[in-house]
Image (cartoon, helix red, strand yellow):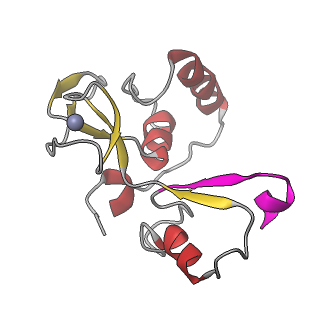
Amino acid sequence: MFRQNYGCSHLIVGRDHAGVGDYYGPFDAQNIFNEIPTGALVLRPLCMDWTFYCYECGTMASMKTCPHDSKAVIDENGAYKGGARLLLSGTMLRKLMSEGKPVPSEFSKPEVIAILKEYYDSLEEKVEVKLNKFATGEAKE
Ligand SMILES: [Zn+2]
C-alpha cells in the first residue's frame, strides 16, 4: 500500500522478500497477493522465482528459464570452480562483506562492491550475519 500511495505501478516481490530468517516461507510475501480481491490494488505485484547467476547460461536466470541444476562452487577467494547456479542472496552478500571475504563478481558491479567494502571496513563493531536455509538455497519450497 505504501508503494502504491507513493505512485509505484509495479512491485517486484522476490524470494524471501521479508528477509527475517526462517519465520516466513520463501514465497509467503507473494502468496498474500492471492488473498487480495482482484482490482483492489492499482499496483501490480511481479512475483519472481528463485533467481541466480548461471555459469552455463552465462546470465541471470530463474528456475523457469534455466535447465541446469548443479550448484556453482566458489572457492574462498571468490573464484569460480565449476557448476552452474550461483544463488544471489542479499544475506550471503552481507555475510561475505561483514567477514571481509571476497565477493564473486557475479554478485554485483565492482564499483558497488567497493562502496559496500568501504562501509563494512568502517564499522567499529562487526556484524554477524547468520545464513538461513533460503540464503543458501538449501530450502526450496
Ligand atoms: Zn542455466
Point out the residue furthest to the front here: 39
- Residue 86, x across and y down, in percent: 29, 38
Tell me which segment is drawn in magenta: 1-14
Quadrant location of residue 52?
Answer: top left
Camera-side residue: 19 or 95?
Answer: 19
Q: Disc count in the image? A: 0
Quadrant location of residue 125?
Answer: top right
In the rendered image, the quadrant that contains the N terminus is bottom right
Ligand 1 resides in the quarter of the picture at top left
Compared with residue 64, is residue 30 higher up or lower down, i.e. above or below?
A: below
Q: Residue at x 54, y 24 (%)?
A: 113
Is 67 contained in the magenta span? no
- Residue 33, x across and y down, in percent: 58, 74
Point out the residue furthest to the right here: 6
Camera-side residue: 139 or 9?
Answer: 9
Compared with residue 34, is residue 106 higher up or lower down, i.e. above or below?
A: above
39 relative position to 111: left or right: right
64 relative position to 114: left or right: left
- Residue 71, x across and y down, in percent: 18, 42
- Residue 36, x across and y down, in percent: 63, 80
